[in-house]
Image (cartoon, rainbow, N blue to C red):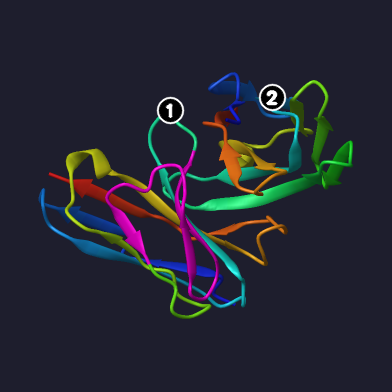
Amino acid sequence: KQEVTQIPAALSVPEGENLVLNCSFTDSAIYNLQWFRQDPGKGLTSLLLIQSSQREQTSGRLNASLDKSSGRSTLYIAASQPGDSATYLCAVSRSNDYKLSFGAGTTVTVRA
Amino acid sequence: NAGVTQTPKFQVLKTGQSMTLQCAQDMNHEYMSWYRQDPGMGLRLIHYSVGAGITDQGEVPNGYNVSRSTTEDFPLRLLSAAPSQTSVYFCASSLNRRNTEAFFGQGTRLTVV
């Protein structure tokens, strides 16, 4: 069974600092990995999707890397802003049945 | 486009009652799924569907039923609500089973008393 872990569960940073969010998974046989953002009381919004053959994806201030062999992905958010405050979840799609396994998320607070 | 629409947003049930959570998408997606989100845990898959007329169980299917009579709609039925089913429920859709860029509804917060 695929286990997805996100540590830390929460972090608080001052505005302008770069954010580094970690995601680890136990089974390297993945199809892809997604990072989502969840605002309080809202649904999930897809931020980045990395195929298993890719090493990284970038969108604006966001960059996600994938190291399949070590079972790790990192989401970098440059020059954080208070609007980046949210919970960030990673999800891994299994290569045998494409089902998504989710981490519990990292709740980020960016202080103005 | 509305994307994925879930109703209701909030619901309180008494133990033993039944209800249906509605989910509709307007993106002509083949793949739809239901998850529950509990504090400190990742989203867990309840049921999923790869197309109209085809459904299958996920990780935590007990106590829930689904059907998929059209491409657009994927309702989740709670047969006899239990306090353990208190959770936030999310419906999601994606183009197909392999293209797993998922689009989520806003969620239904369910409390069973």
Asked if residue B56 is among those painted magenta in the image, a careful observer would answer yes
Q: Could you tell whether A11 is left or right of B109 in the image?
A: right
Prevailing secondary structure of the magenta residues: strand
In which quadrant is the C terminus of chain B drawn?
top left
Counting other residues with Cα less than 10 Å from the Cα at mark 2, is it few (<14), some (14-19), or many (20 or more)?
many
Q: Position of residue B108 (x, y in %)?
A: 35, 56
Give the total of numbered labels. 2
Residue placed most toward the observer, A97 or A40: A97
Please report the residue visible at 46 percent of the width from the left and 69 percent of the height from the top: B5
Chain ID of residue with mark 2: A
Tag 2 and tag 1 share a subunit = no
Chain ID of residue with mark 1: B
Residue that mark 1 sits on: B40
C-alpha gap between disc 2 and disc 1: 16 Å
Q: Position of residue A103 (x, y in %)?
A: 56, 32
User: Mark 2 belongs to which amino acid?
Assistant: Asn
